[in-house]
Amino acid sequence: MTLAVPAIPAHHAADFPRRDRQALLRIENLVVEYHVHGNIVHAVSGVSLEVLPGETLGLVGESGCGKSTLGRAVLQLVRPTSGRVLFEGKDLAEMRGGPLRLLRRRLQLIFQDPIASLNPRRRIGDIVAEPLIIAGIGKAERQRRVREVLGAVGLDPDLTMGRLPHEFSGGQCQRISIARALVLEPQLLICDEPVSALDVLIRAQILNLIETMKARYGLTLLFIAHDLAVVKAVSDRVAVMYLGKIVEVGATQALFRFPAHPYTSVLLEAIPLPDPSIAPPENVPVGEPPSPIAPPSGCRFRTRCPRATELCAAEEPPLRELAPGRFVACHYPLIATPDPLIATPAPCDASAAGAKEADRTRATQ
Ligand SMILES: Nc1ncnc2c1ncn2[C@@H]1O[C@H](COP(=O)(O)OP(=O)(O)OP(=O)(O)O)[C@@H](O)[C@H]1O
Ligand code: SF4
Ligand SMILES: [Mg+2]
């Protein structure tokens, strides 16, 4: 079967990649399986990814595709079945006890539900100070750091430290969670759906806060969300996940403009448009994704893919590099040219930063 592959206009060939840096986090062939009532849930199936220092890598995919499991497996909160998680070259999956706890201080996680993630019986000052107590930091220094980080996230320490979580709104609780995650000055922050439980007006504030904290603390982010508009607004690069596998990775603006994987394309088409006069998309896959207990043979997306052929059922497409920094796992990608447009720009690229800011506003309107 021959499929039409559109050419990409040459005038879009703007941003070249700058892959001259060592990855801060390198995930190699990571597998996570859960054993449930005699069944195996294939939550993460051979994921390989790199997160470069200073960038925000967005991880997007439908509910249940394995995003949180991947984030937790990086931190070893869920132990991988196999594979490696290299942080500055050290394999966390092989570490245990004290050395793991020591290294894990440099990787922190923000959860989806800010209220549930804070102990309701502890005062905010104690919640934020807890990582410092575990790290053996003395009382005076703890006080200083807690006050400083609460101020950094926009909360008045004098009005905050003595109160309990239920006295705060969802947005304020997320600020407190961010303060707790930052108090040990980590290098890598994993944000697991940090705004999806918040109402629309608060989302923009928290996204802007995360961006400000990233600059202030020199953070690298792995930003997990199922909302593409939010991912677009914060990410330098995006990894698209489907049923436990990464199907596409690329620079945000290029990937959104020219998706190479059919799943990325239908995800983008499924973003609701504010104009009711515009007809809904035709290409959106029907039904629910297959069960991760019995994923389809070959390409896992084939049961919902409008382009599937017999080859897709017989052979799993490997994740291959179409152009520098643009990876896709598909036998028939939607773009086939090694055009530099689909490559990865430097995360600090000024035009990309401007585009992200505009997207943050749009994502929360
Ligand atoms: N502790 C667990 N035990 C058994 N199965 C689990 C466990 N945690 C997750 N799963 C299953 O693993 C798969 C991946 O779940 P995961 O929570 O990682 O997905 P997700 O992409 O984060 O979804 P969401 O967008 O809804 O948060 C799902 O099928 C889920 O039901
Ligand atoms: S490999 Fe085949 S089934 Fe899978 S996304 Fe590509 S065209 Fe669709
Ligand atoms: Mg999740």
Image (cartoon, rainbow, N blue to C red):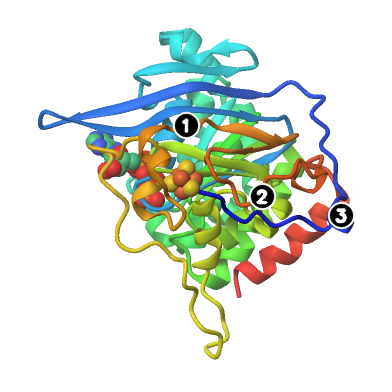
Between the residue at mark 2 and the residue at mark 3, the CA separation in whole angstroms equals 14 Å
| Quarter residue 359 falls in | bottom right
The answer to whether the residue bearing label 2 lies less than 8 angstroms from the nearest atom of ligand 2 is no
Q: Residues within 10 Å of mark 2 (few under 14, many from 20)?
A: some
For the C terminus, the image quarter is: bottom right
At 37% from the left and 55% from the top, the residue drawn is 304
Please name the residue that numbered disc 3 is placed on.
10
First along the sequence among labels 2 and 3 = 3
> Residue 306 in the image: x percent, y percent?
44, 58
Please name the residue that numbered disc 2 is placed on.
335
Find the residue positioned furthest to the front: 1
> Residue 152 in the image: x percent, y percent?
69, 48
> Residue 63 in the image: x percent, y percent?
37, 52
**Can residue 117 be seen?**
no
For the residues labelled 3 and 1, say whether their Cβ atoms are less than 8 Å apart: no
Between the residue at mark 3 and the residue at mark 1, the CA separation in whole angstroms equals 54 Å
At 61% from the left and 37% from the top, the residue drawn is 182
Q: Nearer the viewer, residue 134 or 41?
A: 41
At 79% from the left and 24% from the top, the residue drawn is 21
Say whether residue 39 is left or right of residue 131. left
